[in-house]
Image (cartoon, grey):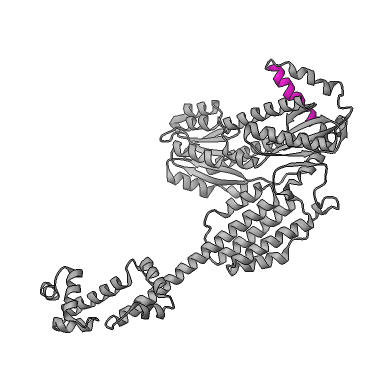
Amino acid sequence: MEQSKVTYSVVLADDEPIILRSLKAAIPWEELGLRVVGEARNGEEAQQVVSEVKPHIVISDIRMPTIDGITLMKQVMTEHTGLIFIFISGYGEFDYAREALRQGAFDYMLKPIDHDELTEILVKARERLDGERQRQLESERLMHSVQALSLLARERMFAEMIEGNQKPLQHLQWLENSELNQTYFMMIVQLEHYEAMNRQWTAEEKRLWFFAIRNILEEWSGQNGGLTVFPFRSGEWVLLFPKDSRERKLRLGEEMLRTIRSNSKLACSVGISPEAYGLEQLSQAYEGALQALHQRFYSGGEGVFIEEMPRGAQDGQSDVKGRYPKHLESQLAESVRTLDVERLGALFGQLKSYIEQEGFSAEIARRFIVQLAVILDQQLEYVHAPHGGGSMEELLQQLEEAATLDELIGQARASFAGRIMARSTQQSREDGHSAIEKAKKYIANHYHKDLGIEEVSELVDLSASHFCTLFKQVSGYTFLEYLTQCRIEKAKYILKHSDVKVYQVAPLVGYQDPKYFTQVFKRVMAMTPSEYRERA
């Protein structure tokens, strides 16, 4: 079956902004199935961008400030071995470009850049990436088969023999002499939140984790009569044990989790398969243990899960494509539009109950919630709600990594509730600004009267205390400071543009006592009204 076209990411690095702009504009990126995800103007910045976005292709000037192109390539390819480098060089740098090819660059081209030539190079680069991806997919498909399971065990054992450890030679007999021609069961150990931790761990931390878990499980398995143990997928280990009682299986699983937690501080879950017989049923045992682990989605926490089908799987509900909660979608959208956080929480509770009742698989439940999240995000865009603590992309990443239904619902509910509350606060702040602006206009028109806080706060329909606090927050002045400033400004205008006596100015700006007016004026202006008039 033909694989759907994948979009590969590209980083551009050149110290000339015009070249960066021309590359972005002249190359048909989308048509090539490529996307520019970052750019840099020197080698050090390029190294940081590549480390952050982890692109598939880097197009770089071979000569750049801080770090040159070849040094950049050597440094980043230690952690990104499959990275494709395409260099741009000047006519006088041919030897340097040839050295880049020897060091592992995919191709190079001379300036001025021929965009058609670069497009052809990118087509070839994409073909290489497609080929590598196809080989990876074929390898992953092989991992599902009985032969792949056997091969993994063989490769692990042979690797330890090469390192000088002859112990695996004894256990290799379960493959050679068909020791699995007996009834056995399989345990799958999955590390909790592996994808999130895998992104955070350095390459050294990943290596240490791998060897630590391997040593823990090998020792524990040997002490408890295990047949073999080996890594399978990322964050997942497989163990085989001879036939045993259900109670004994559960005890083994719980003991294993305690052992891993106490020795590595990592949390795991265990799925235990129904009993199987012979090498030909290894794949079947794996599927059974994996189905047991599906119960983790509804359990709400790590644990040991055994032999039971996930809810909904027995009657085929896990494969149902319909039954999307359209009725809840419209209600959730309305709660978002009206900024009703309480109703939103209740509706997410109903959504959780609906998914549990229908018994959807984790994949279908996740797809439904992601679809709802996209719709609710659009509704919040309509009401100009801020993103607050995280972007939509971050929420989708969290939903992808959620291991349980509780986590899925909880993350979605928390994200949208937070944005609704942020919008409500923003709206309240906007309403507060409007109220204070109204108060300031009223002061400007009535400053000459005996104006008090109670009168103005009543005008804007706020309590006197709330009005005082809000007025200070918005204007930066207390009510009295603002009123005084307004009156003094009016007094200055009258003194400067008329011959009205000073004692006559006082009542015109709200002061019935001319002496008090003079004191206030001098405190604000550091001079008397008469002195101000003389200097004006």
Q: Residue 41's image quarter?
A: top left
Q: Give the x, y percent position of residue 286.
A: 80, 37
Q: How many marks?
A: 0
Name above or below for residue 311 compared with residue 94.
below
Q: Residue 492's image quarter?
A: bottom left
Residue 490 inside the magenta-drawn segment: no
Specify the segment rendered in magenta: 147-162
Residue 293 is left or right of residue 529, and the answer is: right
Q: Could you tell me which quadrant the C terminus lies in?
A: bottom left
Q: Nearer the viewer, residue 109 or 369?
A: 369
Please tell me which residue is depicted at 48% across the width and 69% down the height of the picture: 428
Q: Nearer the viewer, residue 49 or 512?
A: 512
Q: Give the x, y percent position of residue 57.
A: 57, 39
Please tell me which residue is depicted at 66% across the width and 55% down the height of the picture: 409
Residue 100 is left or right of residue 247, and the answer is: left
Name above or below for residue 205 compared with residue 114.
above
Q: Could you tell me which quadrant the N terminus lies in?
A: top right
Task: From the image, give the main secondary structure of the stretch colored magenta.
Answer: helix
Q: Give the x, y percent position of residue 510.
A: 25, 81
Q: Nearer the viewer, residue 87 or 348?
A: 348
Q: Give the x, y percent position of residue 524.
A: 20, 69
Residue 154 inside the magenta-drawn segment: yes
Residue 183 is left or right of residue 217, and the answer is: right
